[in-house]
Amino acid sequence: MEKLKSGEFLVKETESSNVFIPEEYNEEQQMIAQTIKDFLATELYPIVDQLDKGDRELMAQTVRKAGELGLMGIAIPEEYGGFEQSFVTQMLAAENIGAGYSFSVAFMASTGIGTLPIMYYGNEEQRQKYVTKLASGEFIGAYCLTEPSAGSDANSGKTNAVLSEDGKHYIINGQKMWITNAGFANTHVVFAKIGNDRVLSAFIVEKDMPGVVIGPDEHKMGIKGSSTAQIYYNDVKVPVENLIGKPGMGFRIALSILHMGRIKLGANVIGAAKKAITDSVKYANERKQFNTLISSFGAIKHKMAEQAIRTFALESSIFRASNDIDDLMTELKSSGMDKGLASIEAISHYAVEAALLKVYGSEVLDFVTDEAVQIHGGMGYSAEMAVERGYRDSRINRIFEGTNEINRLLLVETAIKRGMKGDFDMAGPAENYYNNMENCREDKKDGESFFDQKLRYIRNYKKAALVLIHAASAKYGKDILKEQEVINNISDIMIQIYSAESLALRVKKIEETNAKSNIDIYKDMLAVNVFDAAGIVSKKAVDAVYSMCEGEEANKMYKAMKNLTCVEGVNVKDARRRIADYLIEENEYKF
């Protein structure tokens, strides 16, 4: 079956046989994951308190140790000293690194945004000179885009590059802020405008070049072990050979790398969430109140079950999208495209899913860590407990890689543009459902199975989203992005659709392949998730309707939205208790 294009999940179905699920990891992938877990246990967790005191050199040493194990070269082709693993494997590594608190921030910044602009857009000489060292851990990388006056609007940056009279150097002047790894990075990918250019270019700057000045580390709410500082470039002479790509390509490079950073963040937070859940259940299985283990209380079971459901749905979504990216990478490489460009083109293609999963993942982790603190009670607020650090460290993820506000707008805008551009037909189905909104709900058929029912509900949610997209596009036209509240409603519905469908396809495939013996637990997860999604989709849809429409049109659309989100009831209490009981019995996240 043909793979869906980015955003096409709104109008087309996917067979469970065509999605990758984590239950299918091969032995090599499992070994990589275990290597990372062992590294965190032996090399990181014993020093995590010391790292949080801002020991730059200790963090740099720890990152280099990971490089010695080959962990920094997982995404890099063999000819540049890496292991050239699939995108799914890269995401599995990102997930497991995510349990490493601020270390994961330093590691991911270097291996991702600090390395891959050179790998994907650099020439052969740049790759041999820099990527080989970044892949081994000899070098640590940083990504320098944000400026005091240029945050979400990256292209408004003022850092400038002027070609020297002899044509051998670019003289760079400017200031960058919020730079991860600033205190110890060997190489900086710096974005600047050449002369009077209106768009950015990208350069490789070495920390020891005269005129590079590193500021003191920022005092942050969380991720205290990562070095975050301002960097000043004062008449820095950068060889012309260090221009990445062509002049004016910087903005394209920045956007493409951000797509990659977003989806990898979505994977990264899975590891942090699983650790927080494990910390939660272990504490709940030890802590007594009223002479009873708190893990036996219904309110605590509800919290732990919901932590698990959201994390499992996120994981299902991430690896569904990652496999689609892998398939497109393979297709592009087989057509003769350069490995680096094939990789970034495939990732960039799935921009809708990257933005969606960045938002969903960061908000899942915030929920999980918040509930972890609550399960720990007063002890959760104490720095003695790991969940306190996890709670603080989580908060940055809704700001990293473009704020969630920007990404909510982006995912809807990109999906609409892809549909209008002809990547897939969105306008046709959207108009059709809008014109027939009173009768477009798909109803139960004879012999409907458990999975048929859940997927039917999700198809109805899709119809609700498409009706809203048509209504908003018709009403606002080119000004649609100015109606950010309505766009946010639609984006939240799209997030529910993609995550619920990914979960449904995973659980269905688990049953079809007998991948797990306790399938009923996973059906419980799906039943609760799809039931809860109905309420969320209904609320967001109704909010959008009354924000756009009045009178008879509003009444008509309201009834349609309620109709499309009408589902049979689920005993969520008992379902969550069964999920929690399995978690309690295992005493760790083991779904």
Image (cartoon, rainbow, N blue to C red):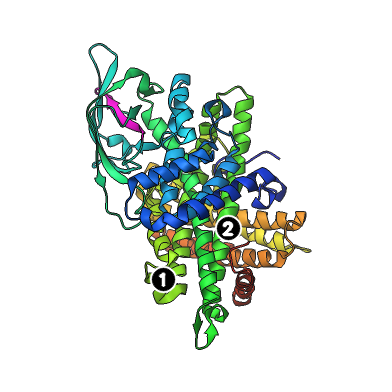
- On screen, 286 above or below 152? below
Amino acid residing under circle 1: Gly
Residue under circle 1?
380
Q: Residue drawn 37% across and 37% down?
A: 142
Alpha carbon separation for disc pair 2 and 1:
25 Å
- For label 2, the SS is helix
Q: For the magenta stretch, what is the residue range?
A: 186-197
- For label 1, the SS is helix
Give whichever of discs 2 and 1 has the lower sequence position. 2
Q: Nearer the viewer, residue 379 or 566?
A: 379
- 107 is within the stretch colored magenta: no
Q: Residue drawn 69% across and 62% down?
A: 453
Query: In front: mark 2 or mark 1?
Result: 1
- Residue 304's spot in the image, x, y percent? 54, 70
Residue under circle 2?
313
- Residue 180's spot in the image, x, y percent? 35, 43
Amino acid residing under circle 2: Ala
Circle 2 packing at 10 Å, graded few (<14), some (14-19), many (20+), is: many
How many labels, in total? 2
Residue furthest right in the image: 447
